[in-house]
Image: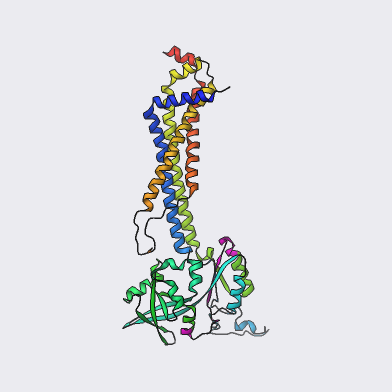
């Protein structure tokens, strides 16, 4: 029967007798695990930041009334004739309103759905910003501010002012950062907005909105829902868009299809709206994990080389152990336990190094105009990365020690003694 206390004692003696080689092997594991944790924590944190930049402001399902040609054209209403052909020239799309029909009952039904976290209305209006002699084309979006903050983290993108002020101020506007810069406008200033019909309304700037996407920030601003409805001269039930947030994003595709069939609206799910973005995220994650795992594998090869050299240096010790009555399996267990001890020690320090450097990175200043609310580098402290690192350390050191241990098991002590 194998005496594990003796095996572990011998393993410990062997490791301590070659402390430099043991230290190098453990450092290899520490470096591999630490680098894995640092890289995967930082890259997944960065990916999460980029995902959040887009997905936090993207509804899981976006409902609107798309303007498109009529399904049936005038020619379709003519009866077929046998002796002639009827031709219709200059067919134009039929005028349709941009508003969603029966929007308020639809929103009530959506909010009663147990799968829906919330449905918030919007009114989109094409307008011109006027300040002094400067006139810029833009887009004014009427929103329910409190619901936007609750469902889409709207407040994170308000870099100056308070989004709650917009809810309590009828003539307020959250100006897009790009448009405000071009017109030299600041919080507290007044900007005039002109509708396509020529009506002009003064609005007080209560905050600056910055999404991080310049093509949006240069044209888009926000006001309360009733403010935009009043500017357009439309009633309370005038709503052009409904944004839906679900508890489970995976249900977005099925819900979009169901809403289109049931309510005759255009419903775009988040996968369709962000197909290219999702592809980029998947590729970044693939590269991150591929590089991280490669580091661990390289560390495993380093451990294998060190243990292999250790066995050749310990030939005499192996011969003495076998001559003293140790079986080949006992010798194999001695060297495998050495590998696992190296993996355990290296993995422990790898976790400490990985966590310590991750904390340092997390506190480094990171400022950019595209991400005004982010002050430090993003780091993901997911515990699963640390568990994966330790498990991989033990598995790689086990495999790295297994082949050298098999060699030690098959060594003939007589040949070693005769060779001396």
Outermost top residue: 418
On screen, 276 above or below 13? below
Report if residue 56 lies within the magenta region.
no
Report if residue 247 lies within the magenta region.
yes
Residue pictured at 60% horizontal, 79% vertical = 102
On screen, 79 above or below 376? below
Give residue 122's position: percent from left, percent from top.
Answer: 51, 75
| Residue nearest the observer in this picture, 302 or 370 | 370
In the rendered image, is residue 332 in sight?
A: no
Give residue 260's position: percent from left, percent from top.
Answer: 61, 71
Give residue 294's position: percent from left, percent from top.
Answer: 44, 42
| Rendered-image quadrant of the C terminus | top left
| Rendered-image quadrant of the N terminus | top right
Residue pictured at 46% horizontal, 79% vertical = 125
Residue bounds of the magenta highlight: 230-253
Colouring style: rainbow
Give residue 225's position: percent from left, percent from top.
Answer: 49, 78
Q: Quadrant of residue 242?
A: bottom right
Q: Quadrant of residue 27?
A: top left
């Amino acid at each position: 029967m194998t005496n594990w206390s003796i095996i572990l004692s011998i393993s410990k003696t062997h490791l301590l007798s070659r402390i430099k080689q043991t230290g190098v092997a453990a450092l290899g594991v520490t470096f591999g695990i630490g680098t894995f944790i640092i890289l995967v924590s930082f890259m997944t944190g960065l990916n999460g930041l980029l995902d959040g930049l887009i997905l936090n402001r993207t509804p899981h399902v976006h409902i609107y009334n798309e303007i498109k040609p009529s399904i049936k054209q005038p020619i379709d209403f003519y009866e077929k004739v046998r002796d002639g052909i009827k031709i219709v020239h200059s067919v134009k799309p039929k005028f349709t309103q941009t508003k969603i029909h029966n929007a308020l009952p639809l929103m009530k039904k959506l909010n009663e759905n147990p799968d829906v976290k919330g449905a918030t209305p919007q009114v989109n209006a094409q307008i011109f910003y006027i300040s002094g002699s400067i006139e810029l084309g833009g887009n004014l979006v009427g929103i329910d501010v409190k619901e936007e903050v609750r469902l889409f983290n709207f407040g994170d993108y308000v870099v100056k002012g308070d989004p709650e002020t917009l809810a309590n101020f009828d003539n307020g506007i959250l100006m897009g950062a790009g448009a405000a810069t071009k017109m030299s406008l600041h919080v507290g200033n007044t900007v005039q907005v002109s509708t396509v019909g020529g009506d002009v309304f003064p609005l007080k700037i209560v905050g600056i909105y910055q999404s991080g996407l310049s093509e949006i920030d240069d044209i888009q601003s926000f006001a309360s829902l009733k403010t935009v409805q009043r500017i357009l001269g439309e009633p309370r039930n005038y709503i052009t868009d409904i944004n839906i947030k679900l508890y489970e994003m995976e249900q977005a595709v099925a819900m979009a299809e169901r809403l289109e069939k049931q309510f005759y609206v255009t419903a775009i799910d988040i996968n369709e709206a962000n197909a290219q973005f999702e592809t980029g995220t998947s590729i970044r994650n693939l590269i991150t994990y591929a590089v991280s795992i490669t580091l661990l594998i390289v560390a495993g090869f380093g451990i294998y080389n060190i243990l292999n050299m250790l066995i050749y240096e310990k030939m005499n010790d192996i011969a003495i152990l076998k001559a003293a009555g140790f079986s080949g399996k006992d010798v194999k267990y001695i060297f495998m336990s050495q590998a696992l001890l190296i993996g355990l020690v290296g993995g422990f320090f790898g976790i400490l190094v990985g966590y310590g450097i991750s904390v340092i990175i997390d506190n480094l200043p990171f400022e950019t105009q595209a991400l005004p609310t982010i002050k430090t580098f993003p780091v993901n402290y997911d515990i699963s990365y640390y568990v994966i690192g330790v498990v991989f350390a033990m598995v790689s050191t086990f495999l790295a020690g297994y082949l050298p241990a098999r060699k030690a098991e098959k060594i003939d002590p007589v040949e070693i003694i005769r060779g001396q």
